[in-house]
Image: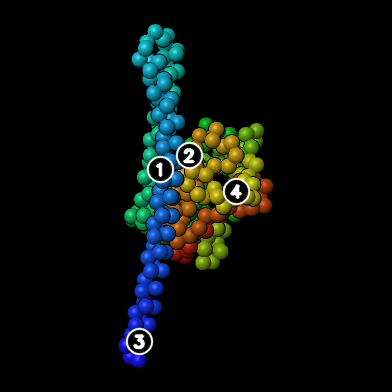
Amino acid sequence: MEYSNQLEAKSAELTRTARQLRAANEKLTQMSVQKDAFLSQISHELRTPMTSIRAFSEILRDGGLDDAALAKYAGIIHDEAIRLTRLLDDLLDLSVLENGQVSLNERVGKIGDVLNQAVAAAGIENSRLRVVRSKVREDLMIYTDLDRLSQVFINLISNALKYCDAARPRLEVSIRDLGDTLAIDFIDNGSGIPMASQDVIFEKFSRVGSDQAAGGAGLGLAICREIMHRLGGTVSYLPGQGGGAFRVILPVTVVRSGR
Ligand code: ADP
């Protein structure tokens, strides 16, 4: 009797182990498929700028161009090389963030200063984008990785610049103190994102419709999501606002003396 009980227990254990092995195998297959898809997306993204660099450098090499054409083609090569560098920087940043290898540099600062710095760095100075700040608690002190938070703001502001109404470009930013969290909203007056795409845009390489013309590789929001995750907060799409609208939630390890 004892022996048959032992046999039964062993058999149950073997069944369990077999099930675990099958699950691990399925997971590995799934990871391998994801890795292949990722590599093929990367190759595609790298190929586009590389093809132009190759084509235009061949034209330069063949010579016989006047100064204007020379400057034009050299300019294209330069722009494509910058795009390539940005793409590689973003890929590296995303991979470091995803693997949790990034160390945070947390310090105390004013939320208003982080926003000012992001507005200045978002490349809007030569644009007509009007940044309207409402309900912004400029003086609120926060304790977080201010540079990483600024990176999220810069991404959202430069997206607003790319996708807002070109005739009357406008972005409204608000910061509200919700007690345990801060809600920072970025709402532009562009055409926004269709309901069906509102979740996917945070995935790597996702772009909506024909936005490839805007030149991005679809990594910006994926990076924002990873950063906010590391900062203990979130970034999400805010539906029903008319234009493109994003909400950043930051947990408040706020230094309350700023109140
Ligand atoms: P990209 O570098 O292509 O802009 P992102 O990850 O920042 O990549 O954005 C992904 C996609 O989400 C964009 O290609 C665009 O289709 C859409 N998107 C992002 N921000 C906005 C916005 N403010 N308004 C409309 N669409 C947006």
Residue 241 lies, in percent from the top left, at 66, 50
Alpha carbon separation for disc pair 1 and 3? 52 Å
Q: Which mark is residue 217?
A: 2
Q: Is mark 4 within 8 Å of ligand 1?
A: yes
Q: Which residue is mark 3?
A: 4
The quadrant of the picture showing ligand 1 is top right
Between tags 1 and 4, which lies in front? 1
Alpha carbon separation for disc pair 1 and 4? 23 Å
Q: Total number of numbered labels?
A: 4
Which secondary structure lies at badge 4?
helix
Q: Which residue is mark 1?
A: 39
Say which of 145 and 4 sits in front.
4
N-terminal of the pair, mark 3 or mark 4, is 3
Whether residue 61 is visible here, answered yes or no, is yes
Q: Kindly identify the residue that appears in the image at 36 percent across and 87 percent down.
A: 5
N-terminal of the pair, mark 4 or mark 2, is 4
Between tags 3 and 4, which lies in front? 3
Q: Which residue is mark 4?
A: 197
N-terminal of the pair, mark 1 or mark 4, is 1
Q: Is mark 2 within 8 Å of ligand 1?
A: yes
Q: Residue type at mark 1: give it.
A: Leu
Which secondary structure lies at badge 3?
helix
Q: Residue type at mark 4: give it.
A: Ser
Which secondary structure lies at badge 2?
loop
